[in-house]
Image: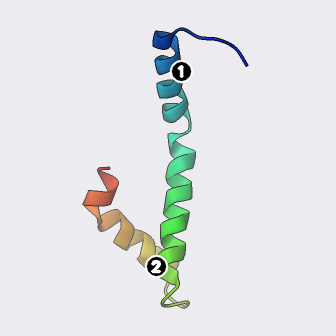
């Protein structure tokens, strides 16, 4: 552990979010695909991903 001033702490948190954004997006997509697959186990992953990408409200969050 190390100490940071409030300004540096805020910048470090922001950098951490940006640096891990791709991985966090992957985790969220995987969770949503799994949720959509529950009712229909045979639904193609590509179709599910296309549905998710069409959901602009979710993507803009």
* Position of residue 13 in the picture relative to residue 61 (left or right): right
Along the line of sight, which residue is nearer the eye, 53 or 38? 38
User: In the rendered structure, are the residues bearing label 1 and label 2 in contact, judged by CB atoms less than 8 Å apart?
Assistant: no
Q: Nearer the viewer, mark 1 or mark 2?
A: 1
Colour approach in the figure: rainbow
Mark on residue 40? none
Q: Is residue 44 above or below residue 32?
A: below
Residue at point 50% right, 34% down? 17
Q: Secondary structure at mark 2?
A: helix
- Relative to the observer, which residue lies in front, 44 or 40? 40
Establish if 39 lies above or below 15: below
Q: Earlier in the sequence, mark 1 or mark 2?
A: 1
Residue at figure coordinates x 54%, y 91% from the top left: 42
Q: CA distance from mark 1 to mark 2?
A: 35 Å
Image vertical order of residue 47 relative to residue 25, above or below:
below
What residue do we see at 42% from left, 78% from top? Answer: 47
> Disc 1 on helix, strand or loop?
helix
Other residues around mark 1 within 10 Å, as few (<14) / some (14–19) / many (≥20): few
Q: Is residue 35 left or right of residue 51?
A: right
- Callout 2: 10 Å neighbours few (<14), some, many (20+)? some
Say whether residue 44 is left or right of residue 55: right
Looking at the picture, how far across and down is residue 48, in whole percent? 43, 76
Question: Which image quarter is the N terminus in?
Answer: top right
Q: Quadrant of residue 52?
A: bottom left
Reading the image, the residue beneath label 2 is: 36
Tell me the residue that label 1 is attached to.
12
On the image, the x and y values in percent for residue 50 come to 38, 71
User: Which residue is rendered at x = 47% and y = 18% of the image?
Assistant: 11
Report the residue that reaches farthest toward the right.
1
């Amino acid at each position: 552990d190390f100490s940071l001033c409030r300004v540096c702490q805020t910048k470090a948190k922001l950098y951490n979010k940006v640096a891990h954004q791709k991985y966090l997006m992957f985790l969220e997509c995987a969770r949503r695909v799994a949720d959509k697959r529950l009712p229909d186990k045979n639904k193609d992953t590509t179709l599910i991903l296309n549905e998710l990408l069409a959901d602009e409200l979710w993507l803009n969050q």
